[in-house]
Image (cartoon, rainbow, N blue to C red):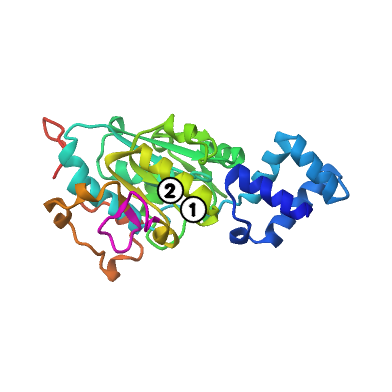
Amino acid sequence: MVDFEIEALLRNTIGLKITSLGRATLDRSVQKRMQALTIADKRSYLKKLKSSALELKELIEDVVIPETWFFRDHAAFIAMNRYLVSRWAQKHENGFLKVLSAPCSTGEEPYSLAMSLLSSGWPAEKFVIHAVDISSRAIAKAKEGIYAEHSFRGTDLAYKTQYFQKKPQYYILNKNVRDKVHFHTGNVLHRACLEGLGPFDIIFFRNILIYFDTFARQQAIATLNKILNDAGILFVGHAETSLFSNSPFTPAPFRHASAFYKNATQQLGAENRKFPAALPASGQADLAGKILQAPLYSKNANNRIKN
């Protein structure tokens, strides 16, 4: 009974579906917090959990285990840039690009977005990235911009030498990349949290919906629909694609990236034929350093984005 009450607290607070996490994993986190507080039984810990917002936050911090790396599922970054060339640039000649990464964990994803845009020649003053996560510890680490080897995966790591300073045991991200990301501690299920930052042209909301219960998923999808601009694009995790079958979104034509447009009627024009629907299988591996093989931004007198 106590275990179910603890699960209910987490479900009501962060939408967590315990079966997606595993009860054994949750129990380990509970036992760890009980030891930290020198509490001997779960009933006493539950009482503490109900009476202390701080302890609930501590449990959430322990349950939410970040697992990410730079340019994770790199096909999404390739798709994002093709979208910018084929669609967004046509409607925003000199526009300001606004991007959301949520949850952002320890910063690898939003920083990858920044590196991708900067590598394309996109002017730093022409975009901003907002990054949100419920974990204040993860946000604190992200702001530091200091990473160990486990954050770099794959074999094509050209960006590593371009954007990081190597130290004996870690890497420091260059300030020009860190400056493009604004971090926020917040619960993505609290609509006001994301609405206050939006609207956005690009949203990366990956690998989080699979941990939500049905109600939380519906809440999140409704919020995403509200904060995404009409001509915007949403990226989710591959395992989350089916969750959008009855949503206000329609699949974007990228076979290897799980992306959605906001309104189907807006996506039936010729612009969808300006890039291949599939990324060749041979192009899937080790592309982090080749995300943008041609510049997106034209450095001519008018500073117009190339179409």
User: What's the residue type where badge 2 is placed?
Assistant: Phe
Magenta stretch in the rendered image: 244-259
Task: Tell me the residue at 40%/38% (across/down).
Answer: 177
Q: CA distance from mark 1 to mark 2?
A: 8 Å
Residue 79, quarter of the rendered image: bottom left
Query: Regarding mark 1 in the picture, which secondary structure is present there?
Result: helix
Q: Secondary structure at mark 2?
A: loop
Q: Residue at x 35, y 66 (%)?
A: 285
Contact, CB < 8 Å: mark 1 with mark 2?
Answer: yes
State the mark number for residue 209: 1
**In the foreground, 236 or 212:** 212
> In screen coordinates, is 192 left or right of 125?
right
Q: Nearer the viewer, mark 1 or mark 2?
A: 1
251 drawn magenta? yes
Disc sitting over residue 65 in the figure:
none
**Label 2, residues with CA under 10 Å away: few <14, some 14-19, many ≥20:** many
| Image point (62%, 61%), residue name | 19
**Residue 198 is drawn in which quadrant?**
top left
Position in image of residue 88 (x %, y %): 21, 42
Tell me if I can see residue 170 in this picture.
yes
Task: Name above or below for residue 68 compared with residue 165.
Answer: below
Position in image of residue 306 (x %, y %): 14, 43
Circle 1: residue type: Leu
Reading the image, the residue beneath label 2 is: 205
Q: Residue at x 59, y 51 (%)?
A: 16
